[in-house]
Amino acid sequence: MKVKNPILRGFHPDPSIIRVGDDYYIATSTFEWWPGIRISHSKDLVHWETLTYVLQEEEILDLKGVGASQGIWAPCLTYDKGIFYVVFTIVRSFYCNMYDTQNFLVTADDIQGPWSKPIALNNFGFDPSLFHDDDGRKYMVSMVTDHRIPKKYAGRIVLQEYDADQQKVIGSVKEIYVGDKIFLEGPHIYKRNGWYYLFSADTGTGELHGQTIQRSRDIWGPYEMFRDDFMHRTSDSEAYSILTTRHYPDYPIQKAGHASLVETQTGEVYAVHLCGRPLKNRNSLDRARFPGSRRYTLGRETAIQKMRWTKDDWLVLDNGTNLPDAEMDIDDLMPCPFSVKPDRDNFDSTVLDVEYQSLRVPMTEYHLSLTERPGWLRLYGREGLASKFHQSLIARRWTEFQFTAGTCMEFEPEVFKQMAGLICMYDTDNYLYLHCSHDEELGKCISILRAENKQYSYPAGYIQVESGKQLYFKVEVDHDRLQFYYAVGMDTEYKEIGETFDCSYLSDEACDEGWFTGAVTGICCQDLTGFGKYADFDYFDYSVKG
């Protein structure tokens, strides 16, 4: 089977993979998006489906108020003796001096849940990972952040034992990696032939990203880092990476790192890792944050690589280099594709499709209904698009550079503070929003609200539309170009509205606050009067080109 990377396309960062029998599961970060921790499923490592989410109950996951790209970070999914384990971080304060990073563990007998209430671990840093040793003992490895100025070190990895009976970490915390120049995070521990392997991401999560491996005969260390001639370096601050794209800026996938390992039924070893597909667009050189950086509207995605063990028990890419494959063959498993979902969701179910997520809170009856008007989704207008508490919004990831999305809506706003429509967004400060509202002079009207790092404009003005008629909204995206369209009532011939926008700012590295997620498209409704004016949506569709 030919596989083209990435395998999980659009906003699927920090992958953690396991195999249980003939089934493969990947957990990925979801940050401020609800539900928390997406689980993808495959039987052949090539074809994947979104299966479920781990954290789906508000009483065990409260994300209200967390900032953009905060919330759920870097889940680690493991399986031991019939039990699924997920450890993860809830980041409540970041982009500041002192981070608040709370680490938790949940368990389940079934990947579909129900999952246990979270068990508090420690809060040293983020990226916790649970290792199950063959003697029955368990250990949690994570990284530590340093808020001091100047920092005392580039990065540290710490280890602590976890007692499953007491449901808590026990004993002292020991540093097993201290780097004065090389920064490591996203650690996992694996065991093979008596060696403990510390598998860690290096050098951040941008275009300098990579993956290192160290080993020790004792889980507590000391650990030796693998070094070889194929690991080209340009300075002592650069890691010895077994996988990286930092020296290949023209390669189709970038940011390679933060990897996790799985062994197939036939004994082959694969790594899944974070990656990104860049646009040609760049930030301006005078920008305070990430000057000149390329933009990634699809966010950080998940790729796969075939690995092999060397004669002296080190792990390397099967291709003999440290450059990941953009395309490769997986021949040791039988193809097992899933049925393809239709592009259009007609809202005929009483539950939302698994592809949709909301911001920070679940979409309860306070926000929406799929039964009040069967075959339609009713969204009750709540807080504004900058709110980090209660928005009525559902969205799905951009998965390709070229796509079309659209909806049909019935909405009769009475004041200008009531809005509903079709949105493309990165976070609460960055979006393009084609919506219907009310103007004192025009009455019912449509407009586009553009937000870029808290700079707002209405570039299309206000267009009067007839009351009592359905509105059809559509958006076409082609890499960095975005065009909105609309139609009214029975006249479904679409008309352009507004300019062709540069949408590359809906991107990693382009936003002033968050830069860890990815662009999404969806539908939403606001009522800033507090009375909950609703909009009814007949369908939402999303179709990729090519």
Image: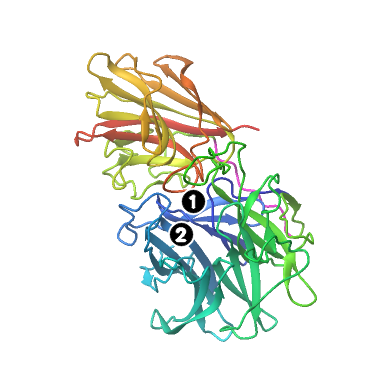
Task: Examine the structure image and report whether residue 434 is included in the region drawn in magenta.
Answer: no
Compared across the picture, whether 157 is left or right of 463 comes to right
Q: Which residues are magenta?
A: 333-342
**Local secondary structure at mark 1:** loop
What mark, if any, has residue 161 been given in the picture?
none
Q: Quadrant of residue 455?
A: top left
- Given contact means CB atoms under 8 Å apart, are the residues at marks 1 and 2 in contact? yes
Q: Up-down: is 509 above or below 99?
A: above
* CA–CA distance in space, label 1 to label 2: 10 Å
Q: Residue at x 70, y 58 (%)?
A: 305
| In the image, residue 69 above or below residue 500 | below
* Percent position of residue 173, x then y: 45, 81
Q: In the rendered image, which quarter contains the C terminus?
A: top right
Quarter location, residue 439: top left
* Residue 1 appears in the rendering: no
Discs 1/2, front: 1
Between discs 1 and 2, the one toward the N terminus: 2
Residue 488: x %, y % from top left? 40, 16
Q: Residues within 10 Å of mark 1 (few under 14, many from 20)?
A: many
The dominant secondary structure in magenta is loop
Q: Is residue 68 visible?
A: yes
Of 255 and 188, nearer the camera is: 255
Q: Is residue 337 above or below residue 232?
A: above
Name the amino acid type tagged 1.
Phe
User: Residue 124, percent across and down?
Assistant: 42, 72
Q: Which mark is residue 516?
A: 1
The residue positioned 60% from the left and 83% from the top of the image is: 222
Magenta stretch encompasses residue 335: yes
Identify the residue shown where x is 55% and y is 69%.
Answer: 187
Q: Residues within 10 Å of mark 2 (few under 14, many from 20)?
A: many
Badge 2 amino acid: Trp
The residue pinned by badge 2 equals 73
